[in-house]
Image (tube, grey):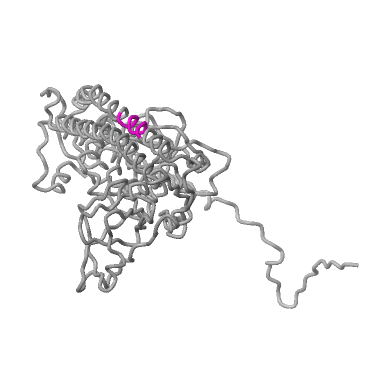
Amino acid sequence: MSASKVEGIGGAGRERLPEGWAWAAVADVGDVELGRSRHPDWHEGPEMRPYLRVSNVFEDRIDTTGMKEMDFSGVFDKYRLEPGDVLLNEGQSPHLVGRPAMYRGEPADVAYTNSLIRFRGNTGILPEWALLVFRNHLHSGRFMREVRITTNIAHLSAARLKAVEFPVPPTSEQHRVAAALDTRMARLDAIDRTVASARRDLIALRKAVLMEAVSEPENWPAHWTATTTGKAGIVELGRARHPNWHTGPKVRPYLRVANVFEDRIDTGDVKEMDFSGVFDKYRLEPGDVLLNEGQSPHLVGRPAMYRGIPEGVAFTNSLLRFRAGNGVLPGWALLVFRRHLHAGRFMREVRITTNLAHLSGARLKTVEFPVPPLEEQQRLIRTTKQRLASLDRIELGLDRTARHNAALRRALLSEAFSGRLVAQDPADEPAEELLKRIRVEREAAEAERRAARKAARASRKAKVDTAPPPPISTVDIALTDGEQTALPLEFSS
């Protein structure tokens, strides 16, 4: 596909490129190959090789921790990575699909699986430039327009990646832009890593605060009452959804798992359903604690308290409701459940179905639940809330830093792809000439491959044609009329 054809695909809304640049498709400027699928039969064999998968590829960074191996007998050359190959995540959450990193030769002799797509640029397309193009597509949301969702995972197929537009500057300008961006992007990446590290520290601190407020059962004070969640209050599952209830005379808003975060209910997208005859059973009251019934394992049981907003709301069976009994404050129940979430207590009760973990009401009822005196509950709620609020303020600061860093990265990439980041040189060979040369080289390579295949077929045919005929079996010789032959007989004694 030529650059002019790609411009037609983009339509009138395509932005203008700097002088000397040209549009192409990804497939016009490099080879795009999906990695090898995994199979139980290849867990061992004569040619075991390490391979990269989606969990190893981060933005502009390959993490070799936990690399696995597989038998690549007879196919290793096809999937072997070369320095300069750019790997993109084929399957991920939607905003991470297409996340790219460059393989720089370490570790050596490594392959890749079909959770990744490999881009290997043609002569004149710098790997560093390809990486910048794909990072720009990632941050601008370009890849998200190409994804397809299956089983809650977004996929970017190799076929769709091949058709994605690819801006091509002169090769010299690719060098200049990549060099100018290298230091700047490295600083932004370092800030992102610092923010990620700080977030991990916050998770550990939050867990420590909650564990100090509600310790392990063997360390509960003697004056606390040790009971279970089912005895400390009422546990109920929400109402199932059904197409017949999308409309009706008693349509009411309801909360579902997408609305319930830790200690926070998001009312930005509240659905409605007909609750004729059953609304009172599922109506929430202020102080009810909602827990995620179905989620990824580490989020099952994520709790939040309903505080009366929005009014007149129910809940569905993706949530469990805990209504505190006598002697138990709702805030204390929320604190206990948050402690169980961070301590991994709920994970011991989950059951996995169709890639989702579920915490049934019956199993939640058996989970241990401490009940201190009411005054002590109030004190622990107050002091823990203050300590967690300090951590929340730190997290808000990290959120602002991350947003600012992302905005800087988008602005920097925008400058690079608008031609304003570095000075242009009129003496550079125009990108159209580079694309023509790439097309000629690709056509020549394809003609060479076709000729090799044709020669191989001719060689095989010649071997068949010149092979001596098989020896004639005496059994197959036709006998003339009346002629007999003696056959050896074998007798067993």
The picture places residue 452, in percent across and down from the top left corner, at 40, 42
Q: Quadrant of the C terminus?
A: bottom right
Judging depth in this view, the residue of 243 and 475 nearest the camera is 243
Q: Would residue 109 appear left or right of 137 to someone viewing this image?
A: right
Judging depth in this view, the residue of 11 and 239 nearest the camera is 239
In the rendered image, the residue lying farthest to the bottom is: 482
The picture places residue 461, in percent across and down from the top left corner, at 48, 51
Q: Tag count in the figure?
A: 0
> Which residues make up the magenta segment?
195-202
Q: Quadrant of the N terminus?
A: top left
Residue 457 visible somewhere in the drawing: no
Question: Relative to residue 202, is residue 489 depicted above or below?
Answer: below
Main secondary structure found in the magenta portion: helix
Asked whether residue 201 is drawn in magenta, I would say yes
The picture places residue 344, in percent across and down from the top left corner, at 45, 44
In the rendered image, the residue lying farthest to the right is: 493
Residue at 40% x, 27% y: name it.
Answer: 105
Judging depth in this view, the residue of 413 and 349 nearest the camera is 349
Residue at 27% x, 53% y: name it.
Answer: 306
Residue at 42% x, 38% y: name it.
Answer: 211
Residue 81 visible somewhere in the drawing: yes
The picture places residue 115, in percent across and down from the top left corner, at 39, 45
Asked whether residue 321 is drawn in magenta, I would say no
- When asked about the image quadrant of residue 398, the answer is top left
Residue at 22% x, 25% y: name it.
Answer: 181
